[in-house]
């Protein structure tokens, strides 16, 4: 019981940290770009990046550490998540190429518009690519964890 409570507390703290980081990263965009069209995908990229990276590096300290069926479920869900992330990043790149983002930033002066465009592009590509890489690695990590538990009796 105490171990379960500790794992739940650990999970909640990580989600709070992820929310704080997402808020910090997205605050400049929220403050200066009222019609920003990529809120959902941006938040998804950040949440998936931190959550999946945490699950990759701290598998033993997650709520599903000893639950093999849940690990299999994570493996199965990873495939559609990868496609969703790639699709969202592709949509963002296409929007940049078609200058949709410049239209949203048109109310700013030239230098601030350029700075914010660069910031948005860099953070979206960083978190988008990082989340895709983490989503590709995660199923392999879960498979190794399942194999270790099954064959060696440890996670």
Image (cartoon, helix red, strand yellow):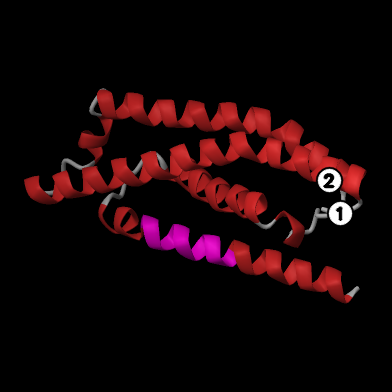
Q: Is residue 134 left or right of residue 67?
A: left
Identify which residue is drawn at 23% across, 44% down.
118
| Secondary structure state at the residue bearing disc 2 | helix
Write the start and end of the magenta stretch as one range: 16-26
Dominant secondary structure (helix, strand or loop) of the stretch shown in magenta: helix
- In the image, 7 versus 43, the foreground residue is 7
- In the image, 26 versus 144, the foreground residue is 144
Identify which residue is drawn at 26% across, 23% down.
98
Identify which residue is drawn at 52% across, 36% down.
132
Residue extending farthest to the left is: 110
- In the image, 22 versus 135, the foreground residue is 135
Residue 104 within the segment the image draws in magenta = no
Mark 2 or mark 1: name the one nearer the start of the chain: 2
Q: Quadrant of the N terminus?
A: bottom right
Q: Which residue is labeled 2 in the image? A: 148
Q: Which residue is labeled 1 in the image? A: 154
| Secondary structure state at the residue bearing disc 1 | loop
Q: Position of residue 60 (x, y in %)?
A: 76, 58
- In the image, 129 versus 112, the foreground residue is 129
């Amino acid at each position: 019981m105490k171990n379960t409570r500790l794992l739940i507390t650990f999970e909640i703290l990580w989600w709070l940290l992820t929310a704080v980081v997402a808020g910090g990263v997205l605050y400049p965009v929220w403050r200066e770009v009222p019609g920003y069209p990529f809120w959902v995908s941006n938040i998804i990229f950040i949440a998936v990046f931190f959550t999946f990276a945490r699950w990759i590096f701290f598998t033993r300290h997650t709520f599903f550490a000893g639950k093999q069926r849940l690990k299999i479920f994570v493996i199965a869900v990873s495939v559609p998540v990868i496609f969703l992330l790639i699709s969202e990043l592709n949509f963002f790149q296409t929007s940049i190429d078609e200058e949709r983002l410049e239209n949203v930033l048109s109310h700013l002066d030239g230098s601030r518009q350029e700075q914010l465009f660069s910031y948005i592009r860099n953070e979206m590509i960083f978190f988008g690519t990082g989340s895709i890489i983490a989503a590709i690695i995660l199923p392999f990590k879960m498979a190794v964890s399942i194999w270790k538990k099954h064959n060696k009796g440890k996670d």
